[in-house]
Amino acid sequence: MSDRQIIVPDSMQLLAERAGYAPAVKIGNTLYCAGQVGRTPELAVIEDPELQFFAAWENLRIVLAAGGCSFEDIVDMTTYHVEMQRYMPLFRTVKDNVFPRNSCAWTCIGVSELARPGLLVEIKCIAVQR
């Protein structure tokens, strides 16, 4: 019997149906979260960079919670950034307001674009439920 569980928070049903992917997959006590971005539940990109960054973290928090985890359970995180040098100071400020510092491995990658025009960051992680 497989212990693989697809995680789709209620507020992400539309996204999962349209995009055809799972926001997270849980195997045992490990949660693999797909990249989360700063968009509304209706899939609109949030234009203000600071609000977009806060929304990306909130969307990640929602996925983690649906899988029984929290920010404190993240062991590995990768962030993908459009115009990384321009927006990194603001992203770090938002991150430091919502995410525990020095709590996981973190890799930042600069990219030319993300799935939708206007997106500036995507946050992907692996969490281990305690």
Image (cartoon, rainbow, N blue to C red):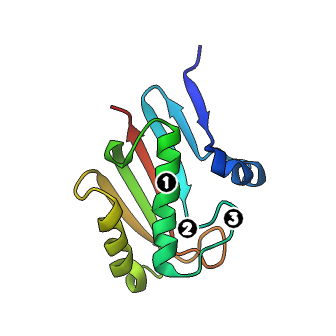
Q: CA distance from mark 3 to mark 2?
A: 9 Å
Give residue 43's mark.
3
In the image, is 124 to the left or to the right of 129?
right
Q: The disc labelled 1 sits on which kind of residue?
A: Leu
**Few, some or many C-alpha atoms within 10 Å of disc 3 (few <14, some 14-19, many ≥20)?**
some
Q: CA distance from mark 2 to mark 1?
A: 10 Å
Q: Are marks 3 and 2 in contact (CB under 8 Å)?
A: no
In the image, is 126 to the left or to the right of 13?
left
Q: The disc labelled 2 sits on which kind of residue?
A: Gly
Residue marked by disc 2: 38
- View extreme (right): residue: 18
Q: Quadrant of the C terminus?
A: top left
Judged from the image, the secondary structure of the residue bearing numbered disc 3 is loop
Q: The disc labelled 3 sits on which kind of residue?
A: Leu
- Tell me which corner region of the image, top left, top right, bottom left or bottom right, holds residue 112: bottom right
For residue 125, above or below residue 101: above
- View extreme (bottom): residue: 86
